[in-house]
């Protein structure tokens, strides 16, 4: 159930109209890393989490609902930045302000500039926010369908990455407005991305084990190999030397990948090296993890009649 409160979560303001920046801000309204995508991403993930992980269901629904609130803030800000456009478009007579903008070279250039920056505001949405990105590309579920995988150890990592992308998008947007009121709104929204990042990270840490993602533990012959796939000087770092961050295996640096593939019969003859894991131990753990995960989820599934609302069950 949703309940709309007419006040915004954050008191968004603008000091003056700015159709150009309104066009850029559409990126966070109908873009791939915007608030609509975030809200629907977490909303979709929550359904699969409700029965086996009711605590994560609560988290995802809370954040999804807040993201809808952020979508409202972005939409309201865009609308304020477009103040006056809708009224002018409703006046189709030649004396309307929009038509008068065509009189004089400078005014005509301003009009053309606005049309180039945000043509959808003038030709399709009538001076209101549109579900497009800043380039006018319509929003699509393709932005988020790959983020609902039915495994929280996967979904939460996707959510952490999504919050990171949204945060840096707000950083970029801040460089293109000098309106102090708009800036304070963007700073608020950006700070909430940081907050959500930490919430998802904390939720991921409560899932044990959470690595490798999902269930199967991965073949120990290949998890600590680093292939030097470029010519020139070698670059070494903790990503290809020392111990790996999660499995604690020693990275095996393959300086000549082509020769390595030939020597190992297309890697079929590769043996685990630099790791205590073996194929046998991994197979045992795969069976154990599969049984535990299956039992965990099946045990949470109610038998017989089901009702989504707790009040109906009580």
Image (spheres, helix red, strand yellow):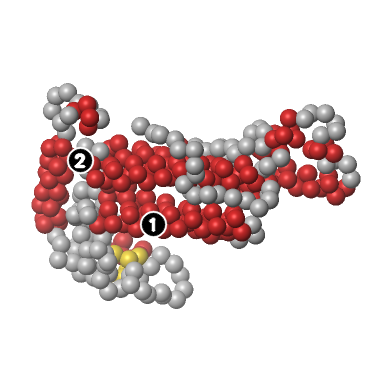
Give the residue at x 12% y 40%. Answer: 295
Residue behind mark 1 = 195
In the shown orientation, is residue 86 left or right of residue 182?
right
- Observer able to see residue 309: yes
Q: Quadrant of the rendered structure where residue 250 is? A: bottom left
Say above or below: 128 vs 306.
below
Residue 224, relative to residue 2: is it above or below? below
Residue 52 numbered tag: 2
Q: Are marks 2 and 1 in contact (CB under 8 Å)?
A: no
Return the disc, 2 or 1, that comes first in the chain's sequence.
2
User: Residue 154: horizontal and vertical position, in percent?
Assistant: 30, 49
Q: Is residue 223 left or right of residue 37?
A: left
x%, y% of residue 44? 36, 38
Can residue 212 be seen from the camera position used here? no
Q: Judge the density around disc 1: few (<14), some (14-19), many (≥20) Cα neighbours within 10 Å.
A: few
Question: What's the distance in space between the residues labelled 2 and 1, CA to CA?
Answer: 25 Å
What residue appears at the point 83 percent right and 44 percent down from the top-left corner? 108
């Amino acid at each position: 159930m949703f309940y709309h409160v007419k006040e915004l979560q954050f008191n968004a303001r603008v000091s003056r109209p700015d159709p150009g920046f309104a066009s850029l801000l559409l990126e966070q309204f109908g873009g791939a890393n915007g608030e609509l995508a975030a809200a629907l991403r977490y909303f979709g993930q929550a359904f699969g989490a409700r029965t086996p992980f009711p605590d994560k269901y609560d988290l995802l629904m809370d954040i999804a609902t807040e993201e809808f609130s952020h979508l409202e803030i972005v939409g309201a800000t865009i609308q304020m930045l477009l103040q006056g456009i809708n009224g002018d478009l409703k006046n189709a007579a030649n004396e309307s302000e929009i038509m008068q903008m065509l009189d004089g070279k400078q005014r005509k250039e301003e009009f053309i500039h606005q049309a180039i920056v945000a043509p959808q505001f003038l030709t399709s949405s009538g001076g209101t926010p549109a579900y497009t990105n800043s380039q006018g590309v319509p929003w699509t579920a393709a932005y988020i369908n790959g983020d609902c995988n039915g495994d929280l150890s996967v979904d939460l990592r996707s959510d952490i990455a999504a919050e990171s992308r949204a945060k840096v998008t707000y950083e970029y947007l801040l460089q293109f407005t000098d309106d102090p009121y708009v800036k304070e709104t963007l700073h608020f929204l950006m700070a909430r991305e940081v907050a959500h990042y930490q919430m998802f990270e904390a939720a991921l840490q409560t899932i044990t084990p959470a690595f490798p993602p999902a269930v199967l533990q991965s073949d120990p012959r290949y998890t600590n190999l680093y292939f030097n796939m470029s010519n020139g000087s070698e670059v070494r770092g903790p990503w290809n030397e020392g111990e790996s961050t999660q499995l604690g295996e020693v990275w095996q640096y393959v300086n000549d990948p082509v020769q390595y593939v030939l020597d190992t019969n297309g890697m079929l003859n590769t043996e685990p090296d630099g790791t205590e894991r073996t194929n046998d131990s991994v197979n045992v753990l795969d069976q154990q993890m599969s049984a535990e995960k299956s039992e965990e989820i099946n045990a949470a599934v109610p038998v017989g009649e089901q009702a989504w609302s707790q009040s109906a069950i009580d």
